[in-house]
Image: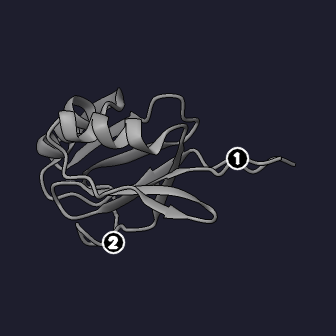
Amino acid sequence: MDWKIELIFVPVTDVDRAKAFYVDQVGFHADFDTRVNDELRFVQLTPPGSACSIAFGTGLGVTMAPGEQNSIQVVIPDADEARRHLLDNGVAASEVEELAWGRFVSFPDPDGNTWTLQELPQRD
């Protein structure tokens, strides 16, 4: 039996600001933006090449406060290129950190939710 993680909720304070950040600056694809009523809105975005999406909105029952999500890690092919893309699009990205288990870049979203990008090490 396969278990596939397909959706991770990210707590945000301003849905439109978060959507613009992730789509226009980071480069995620906008899959859905549905307003069911005045209390319920669901936005789903997917990083390029990913089988797992993120979601946020209003009325979704997410109990984590904006800025508390700091455990999402994304594998990317090139840490330098990813950092350059982020910086070119106005995203505050860390320097590339070189460790034995990969090369890492991190960045915060407008609410302070932190993302980590990992370039995997070469394996023989």
Where does residue 91 sit, x and y in percent of width and height?
19, 45
Taking the image as shown, residue 45 lies to the left or right of residue 122, namely: left
Residue at 32% across, 55% down: 60
- For label 2, the residue is 63
Kindly give the residue lying farthest to the right in the view shown: 1
Residue at 62% across, 65% down: 100
Taking the image as shown, residue 112 lies to the left or right of residue 73, namely: left
Pick the residue in front: 6 or 47: 47
- For label 1, the residue is 122
Where does residue 39 sit, x and y in percent of width and height?
18, 50
Quadrant of residue 46 within the rendered picture: top left
Cα separation, mark 2 vs mark 1, equals 39 Å
Pick the residue in front: 119 or 36: 119
| Label annotation for residue 24 | none
Residue at 14% across, 58% down: 13
Q: Amino acid at mark 2?
A: Thr
Looking at the rendered image, the disc whose residue lies closer to the viewer, 2 or 1, is 1
Q: Secondary structure at mark 2?
A: loop
